Image (cartoon, grey):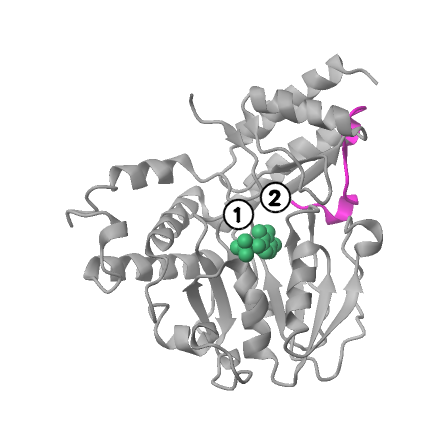
Amino acid sequence: MGRVYNFSAGPAVLPEEVLKEAAAEMLDYEGTGMSVMEMSHRSKAYETIIQEAESDLRELMNIPDNYKVLFLQGGAHLQFSMIPQNLMKNGVADYIITGQWAKKAFKEAQKYGKAVAVASSEDKTFSYIPDCSDLPLDDDADYVYICENNTIYGTKFKELPNTKGKTLVADVSSCFLSEPVDVTKYGVIYGGVQKNIGPAGVVIVIIREDLITEDVLPGTPTMCQYKIHADAKSLYNTPPAYGIYICGKVFKWLKKQGGLAAMKEHNEKKAAILYDFLDQSRLFKGTVVKEDRSLMNVPFVTGNADLDAEFIKAATAAGFVNLKGHRSVGGMRASIYNAMPVEGVVKLVEFMKKFEEEHQV
Ligand SMILES: *Cc1c(COP(=O)(O)O)cnc(C)c1O
């Protein structure tokens, strides 16, 4: 069997070119006689890998010098704890609840201090982004937290919230490197890489230097302190070495594609093909308000759970896999990350049209 069109929300599709390169280097990485998996993370060869990964990411995102880039473990979930442990100096933080991931981060922060939900879109199953132009922020809030792209519900902040000068912290797991970003607007940008960058096991944290201090909450484990990792340049302990190597290859691939501006164009093109079809379809419809639609995760339904299941089954058989929606919303979801080619979306839409014709409503 050849490769399928993989619409998984994560772990997700990676550029074929990167996978082939990694395969070619598997047994002997650049004359070292060993795989990257087998080499010391303190070796010269690995030092080059991690340093190049960082400098390529800095170039792609135009990361200013006063921000650190950390390659860590524990997934996005560990950041739900590390953020309050490291940043809650006043013991207060404001959270914008736009889905399950923001809610989980909010609940975790409540363990460490006063976490306040200052806005939410739960009233309409998280199908929109709430108005964040004039939020009732706490004077003492150490930061304002968002999940910038909501993987499960398919919404995206098109405009960042007005934080009234407070530090913005963003989980960008599912929109990482999908379009250009102004890093200076954030205190912390972080994401698990398994959605849009690389293999599961790496989380990247981009954090402004003044937020990295020894003044963390009492009892914060050493491994959960940003300062420890920043001082050690992400090599305090053994990092997820092979995963970082693949991320580095994806950064080089992105540069070759023309960087994040080119990615944005590519992603807008793909999303438009799918949304335009959904907007005129008699069978399928999108579940998100138009202005807040994600470029990365596109949920849709037929309105009939049995028909949804039939569609998913037929699609899978035709080579369009992992289209089942998240268990909390049902229906379908097509995740169309950077590495999904335009052709994959065009063919999916052709398949949907055919399915629609065969299931006239
Ligand atoms: C997948 C996802 C997470 C959870 O990531 P883990 O690495 O499994 O902890 C958190 N936030 C967002 C936005 C995600 O898409």
Residue at x-position 65% and y-position 85%: 90
Element on which disc 1 rests: loop
Q: Amino acid at mark 2?
A: Met
The location of residue 139, given as percent across then percent down, is 74, 83
Along the horizontal axis of the image, is 292 left or right of 52?
Answer: right
Looking at the picture, does residue 50 appear above or below residue 309? below
Distance of mark 1 from mark 2, alpha carbons?
A: 10 Å
Q: Quadrant of the C terminus?
A: top right
User: Which quadrant holds residue 3?
Assistant: top left
Q: Is residue 289 magenta?
A: yes
Along the horizontal axis of the image, is 39 left or right of 190?
Answer: left
Query: In the depicted view, which residue is nearer to us: 280 or 121?
Result: 121
| Figure disc tally | 2
Query: In the depicted view, which residue is nearer to us: 319 or 274?
Result: 319
User: Which quadrant holds residue 332?
Assistant: top right
Residue corresponding to mark 2: 296
Residue at x-position 54% and y-position 27%: 343
The location of residue 276, given as percent across then percent down, is 72, 31
The location of residue 18, given as percent across then percent down, is 37, 40
Along the horizontal axis of the image, is 256 left or right of 270?
Answer: left
Residue corresponding to mark 1: 195
